[in-house]
Amino acid sequence: MPLIHVALRAGKPEAYREAILDSLYRALREALDVPEDDQFMTISEHAPGNFRHGTAYGVQRGDDLVYITITVFNTRTPEQKKALFRRIADLLGESPGIRPEDVFVVIADAPKENWSVGHGLQFA
């Protein structure tokens, strides 16, 4: 049950934003085998003055940079995470056409007891 937040510069059309969400969902299904219709995702758009990046770590990022934060159960292996990073970059390259240099992903692990997915009940 991943929870995803994407941050990007404002101004992209709805179809572009939908393609990001669709590609992320596909990557999660393929790399982490998440259940069908497990789609808990948001996008926030930021004015250029509120969205900054640099070239740290030898990566030449551009204005199409997307920051992707994925919170998942702490049961994922390093191999699964590595496969997810690669699949996200590949699929976002296909649709909506984001360069791999502009795909910045962070995975945050959280134990299941830290989740409530409805009704105020702890995830079991």
Image (cartoon, rainbow, N blue to C red):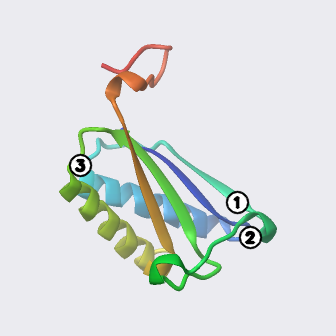
Quadrant of residue 85 within the rendered picture:
bottom left
Q: Which residue in the structure is indicated by mark 3? A: 33
Distance from the alpha carbon under mark 1 to that under mark 2: 8 Å
The residue under the point 45% across, 22% down is 116
Query: Which image quadrant is residue 124 in?
Result: top left
- Residue 12 locus on image (x, y percent): 68, 71
Looking at the image, residue 78 lies above or below residue 108: below
Q: Determine the CA span between mark 1 and mark 3.
A: 28 Å
Q: Residue under circle 1?
A: 45
Q: Residue at x 30, y 61 (%)?
A: 84
Question: Closer to the camera, 41 or 50?
Answer: 50
- Evaluate if marks 2 and 3 touch, with contact meaning CB atoms under 8 Å apart: no
Residue 114, position as x, y percentages in the image: 41, 25
Looking at the picture, does residue 90 appear above or below residue 76?
below
Mark 1 vs mark 3, foreground winner is 1
Assign a secondary structure to mark 1: strand
Q: Residues within 10 Å of mark 1 (few under 14, many from 20)?
A: some
For numbered disc 2, what is the local secondary structure? loop
Residue located 29% across and 45% down the image: 34
Residue 51 higher or lower than 63, as above or below: above
Q: Name the element at disc 3.
A: loop
Q: Position of residue 77 (x, y in %)?
A: 20, 49
54 or 85, which is in the foreground? 54
Checking the image for residue 11, the label placed there is 2
Q: Earlier in the sequence, mark 1 or mark 3?
A: 3
The amino acid beneath tag 1 is Glu
